[in-house]
Image (tube, grey):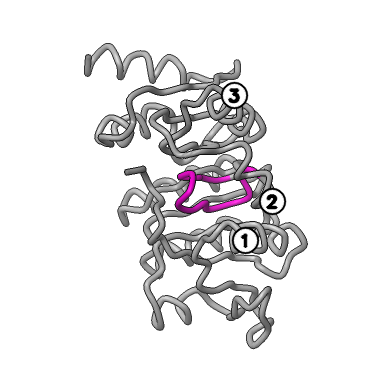
Amino acid sequence: MSILVDSNTTFIIQGITGREAVNTTRECLDYGAKVVGGVTPGRKGRDVFGVPVYDTVREITQKTQVDGSFIAVPPAFARDAAFEAIDAGIKLIVIVTERMPRSQVASLIQFAELRGTRIIGPNCLGIISPGKSKLGSIGGTAADTAKAFSPGYVGVMSRSGGMTTEISNTLTAAGLGESTAISIGGDAMIGSTYADLMPLFEADSDTKAIVVYSEPGCPMEAQLAAYIKKNN
């Protein structure tokens, strides 16, 4: 098993015609992920490595099942892009965008909670369930991703995208492997903290251990410690 993404997860990429998103599209497709569409307003009718581009999210959700969205747009447009995805019924959103104003992130988190949507990020690289799928640019190219990540029983959570890969690479080299690895985001305010994600790992029968990589400057580690103490 895994959490959040598996081999059946379908997702779109918002801002798909941007340079970073084009690379991410290729990396995800090469890894076997199911990218079912992309969104860039005004670019409808184009495609990125065979993935059709639309003007709006709802044009895609009206045609096919969409489980998640990867948002790679400039900070000025990131909240609107996320609002659009949530409003279209998408339940998992990964935001790579950095430097989003905290007030916008706060309103986005509140709207997501009202609609039952899980947000990862902003300022993150995404999620991977090794051997199944990845949603985001985590791990880089498919070849590099296959070297660093392998199916296993250790869950990984890190604020640093690079350290998510580095830790997983060490686990893979030790023959342990990962159930799911998540780059949760390096900004001070993010959609899902360690404590928010811990219950999902707890409920996953294939996750036997957790590795958490912390960074100073926020209360997330203390929140996780309080959760662990409270829930034994």
Q: Please name whichever residue, 29 or 107, is drawn nearer the observer in this view of the structure.
A: 29
Q: Nearer the viewer, residue 229 or 191?
A: 229
Label 1 sits on residue: 30
Q: Is residue 101 visible?
A: no
32 shown above or below 88: above
What's the amino acid at mark 2? Answer: Thr
**What residue is pinned by disc 3?**
170
- Among numbered discs 2 and 3, the one appearing first in the sequence: 2
Amino acid carrying label 1: it is: Asp
Residue furthest out toward the right? 19
Q: Earlier in the sequence, mark 2 or mark 1?
A: 1
Residue 226, above or below 110: above
At x 29%, y 32%, the residue is 199
Res. 149 visible in picture: yes
C-alpha separation, residue under disc 2 versus residue under disc 3: 18 Å
In the figure, residue 229 lies in which quadrant? top left
188 left or right of 198? Answer: right
Mark 3 residue crowding within 10 angstroms, few (<14) / some (14–19) / many (20+): some
Which residue is found at the position 47% from the left and 22% from the top? 211
Q: Are marks 2 and 1 in contact (CB under 8 Å)?
A: yes
Q: Which residue is mark 2?
A: 141
Please, is residue 16 above or below residue 216 in the view?
below
